[in-house]
Image: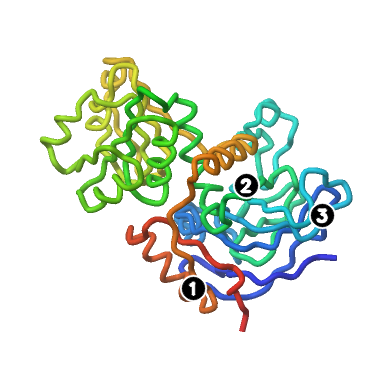
Amino acid sequence: MPHTTNVLQVTSAGAPFIATTIERRDLRDDDILIDVAYAGICHSDIHTARDEWGAAHYPIVVGHEIAGTVAAVGDAVTRHKVGDRVGVGCLVDSCGECESCKDGQEQFCTKPSVGTYNSKGYDGEWTDGGYAQQFVVSERFAVRIPDEMALDVAAPLLCAGITTYSPLKRWGAGPGKQVAVVGVGGLGHMGVKIAHAMGAEVTTLSRSDAKADDALELGATRHVATSDAAAMKGAKRSFDIILNTVSADLDMEAYLRLLKPNGVMVNVGLPMENYSVFPFSLIGGNKVLTGSQIGGIAETQEMLDFCAEHGLGATIEVLDASDPSAVDQAWERVVAGDVRYRVVIDTSTISPA
């Protein structure tokens, strides 16, 4: 039978949260039922629910940073058992047969992949996310949360962790490499922690010095205020890798000048405007300007294991959602950049009137 669960739901663009119930599908043979403990707030949740990217399907339950324990399993499940600590990130299905899926990059599935929320599944039903007390998903898309990692600090890693780990690993962050992280926020703070744990020397780039002390505590050795022309000039040709985590209209020319020859600038932020780049800024110095989209399921597990090994977790504040307006207020703080550094919803507090 379907599983009825308490959720936080938005009924239209700009509408406040309400606490209500929805039905999760009955378990298929390869499904697991998760008792959700914590759900992280991602800026993508806000963009989607406010229809800022278009194509929002209402009513909607967002949330793709899900951490909890397995409550029940389908008849054919072999990867997880009742009581296991698991997480779910941005994906809940893919074809499993295309070249990308076979290569462990389910996010690039050609069918295409199915997102955790606001995505039409292969069964024709729209997906609802993790601002909820229970969640049903195929065992293939649930990853194991290491025992030494608390569930609350693990939840944001299912998006913020993999979004920063994947490009840092791909482009060779490690000993002897100079890595700059643009933005010290929900994504950027994890980029700093992970790059430092990989052995790179890390510099943070932000408009002001407001978060300079935080950056050093997170693992950076230097902070540069990008509004300081002299400081930016002094940082010219300094970095092997620049990880841009902000969704702002940046002067790409200014940042490309900070790269060493053969350096790479990776964008994981999603600004609403196009970047403008003079081709010679790339050709002169063999520089790479690229992007990165989360990671596959195996790499997400690898990221969690790496973070556990190095004692990493998101820096969070836990939110009581017994009053749904608290989540609305938290969203406003996220938009304003007033969070250090991720908000995580205690889903046990979701209670319809």
Q: Secondary structure at mark 3?
A: strand
Q: Which residue does the numbered mark 1 point to in the structure image?
A: 16
Q: Are marks 2 and 1 in contact (CB under 8 Å)?
A: no
| Colour mapping used in the image | rainbow
Choose top left, top right, bottom left or bottom right for residue 231: top left
Q: Secondary structure at mark 1?
A: loop
Horizontally, is 279 left or right of 266 in the view?
Answer: left
Q: Earlier in the sequence, mark 2 or mark 3?
A: 3
In front: mark 2 or mark 1? Answer: 2
Q: Earlier in the sequence, mark 3 or mark 1?
A: 1
Residue 323 in picture, x, y percent from top left: 51, 79
Residue type marked 1: Pro
Residue placed farthest to the left in the image?
230
Q: Are marks 3 and 1 in contact (CB under 8 Å)?
A: no
Q: Nearer the viewer, residue 148 or 313?
A: 148
Tell me if residue 106 comes above or below residue 335 in the rendering: above
Q: Earlier in the sequence, mark 2 or mark 1?
A: 1
Residue type marked 2: Pro
The quarter of the image holding the C terminus is: bottom right
Q: Secondary structure at mark 2?
A: loop
Residue 97 in picture, x, y percent from top left: 75, 30
Residue 199 in picture, x, y percent from top left: 40, 30
Tell me if residue 142 comes above or below residue 194 in the rendering: below
Name the residue: 86% across, 50% down.
Answer: 29
The quarter of the image holding the N terminus is: bottom right
Q: Which residue does the numbered mark 3 point to in the structure image?
A: 73
Name the residue: 40% across, 32% down.
Answer: 266
Name the residue: 53% across, 73% down.
Answer: 321
Q: Which label was assigned to residue 146?
A: 2
Q: How far apart, in angstroms, are the residues tagged by discs 2 and 3? A: 20 Å
Q: How far apart, in angstroms, are the residues tagged by discs 2 and 1? A: 35 Å
